[in-house]
Image (cartoon, coloured by chain):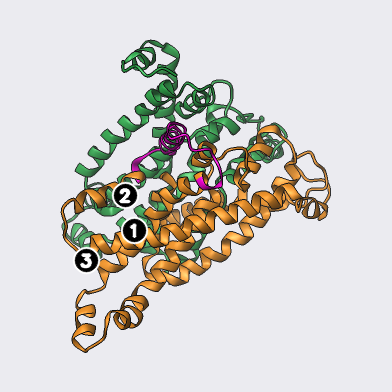
Amino acid sequence: MKHVWNVDNYRQLWQGGAYHSIAFRTIGIAAAVTAADAILAFPLGYFMARIAGGRSRAFVFVAVLLPLWSSYLIRVYIWRLILDHNGVLNWSLRKVGLPAANIGYTNWAVWLIFTYIWLPFMILPVYGALERVPDSFLEASRDLGAGGWITFRRVLLPLALPGVIAGSIFTFSLTLGDYITPLLAGGASSQFIGNVVYDNINNQLTPFAAAFAAVPLAVMGVYLLIARRLGAFEAL
Amino acid sequence: MESRATRIALTVWSGLVVLFLWIPLALIMLYAFNQSNVESWPITGFTTHWFHAAWSSEVRGALWLSVRVGLIATGIALVLGSMAAFGVARFRFFGREAVSFLLVLPIALPGIVTGIALNSAFVTGKVALSTWTIVIGHATFCVVVVYNNVLARLRRSSPSLIEASQDLGADGWQTFRFVIWPVLSTALVAGGLLAFALSFDEVIVTTFTAGAQNTLPLLILGYIRLGQQLPVVNVIAFAMIVLTSIPVLLAQRLVRDTGVRVGTATAQAQQA
């Protein structure tokens, strides 16, 4: 290999329309995964921090931690079986008289599986942030005449936001850098940045792979700067 | 504080999320007993035959490599991670901020970036890919986990403990044995368990640093991609879910007061 310093790899990236759509798909699905995880995790975090008693909190805590520890590949593989044409999902839908979903090997499957796999990473910091909100703040809000919704919007959410952002660093960046789930559970149009990088490395095209890998790196850099502004680092 | 309806809604939601997390795991444990080698639902018959089939030399070889890599990487991480944590926690020196930043930086790096960085470093340095390159790859994120755990523990323990021990006439070894070690031991065990578990499960960095050898995750990846030996994959899944619950419950007991930190440390390290 001859070593010449130039920006050809970046130019190729910039001009290739296919690479744009792959980059947008990767970033878009990462954002959708983050949003879905936040919506699933927030009420659960609230339940753990403020409603559950000691025993049920400990139970939920372990119930969240254990899936985090079981093998990543195995969890992708389970969903392949579930979403398969002859899998549990279609069978259950048929049982209740609904049409088959057939979302196996599509971008929907990739989104759903990432949401499943990274969910505990969102739950833990959100729970931590909600637990640190003092009861007296919520009582004060109520005493000052705020209803449940206003208290949530104006008091609880701003105080818990650093936890959500901290969780989003994980869900977003883990999705951004992954290529195994799209490889195993995605379809022909589910390629992620990581898949292109991996294929190029295998074809000895390391410089181009490195140029494309710089995209998630730059995106994460910007994301971390914003997250630090919003005070997420203290909630890690 | 919340209205009754809100409480009920939140409880139901939480129950559903926990079910979402657990139904797939329960399903795969059923599939391990699937009589057919076609993985469709519903399962028509049950057998324990595949448990025997899964103990093949290929699987044993991969398992043994994974265990070896995990133990060596964890060992390296325990030494380097705790030394770095001591340095950063106890001393002020030029570049201290930079060191602590560089140690934690891998949490922001997508796995694929770490992977190609290591791969091109090995290729450029003409290092042949082997067990040792896998170990080096894993050590990069194992060090972070141990470092984070030990640093958190050191920050919460007062340095005056060590001063008091010295004032009372203990020498360096006695101070270490009777003051520092009791404070640190659970953090080291928890960090070590985390590091090992992460190494044992790592796929992305490993695909770039392993040569022709297969760790257990690489073997499973190959089976799934080719659609071969799926009953064996089911059994491995069953065994892994059962086995991983042991260290989780153990770590949970050791760091009961800092559970959230365990979770985030895992998250950080998975990104490395």
Q: Amino acid at mark 2?
A: Val
Q: Amino acid at mark 3?
A: Arg
Q: Label 1: chain? A: B
x, y percent for residue B44: 82, 46
Using the image, determine if residue B115 lies above or below residue A158: above
Could you tell me how far apart the alpha carbons at marks 2 and 1 are, in whole angstroms? 8 Å
Q: Are marks 2 and 3 on the same chain?
A: yes
Q: Of the residues under marks 3 and 1, which one precedes in the sequence?
A: 3
Query: Which residue: 44% across, 65% down?
Result: B190
Label 2 sits on residue: B104
x, y percent for residue B157: 26, 73
Label 3 sits on residue: B90
- Span of residues in magenta: B107-132
Chain ID for green: A
Indicate the quadrant containing the N terminus of chain A: top left, top right, bottom left or bottom right. Answer: top left
Q: Is residue B201 left or right of residue A223?
A: right
Label 1 sits on residue: B148
Numbered disc 3: secondary structure: helix
Please identify which colour was used for chain B in the image: orange
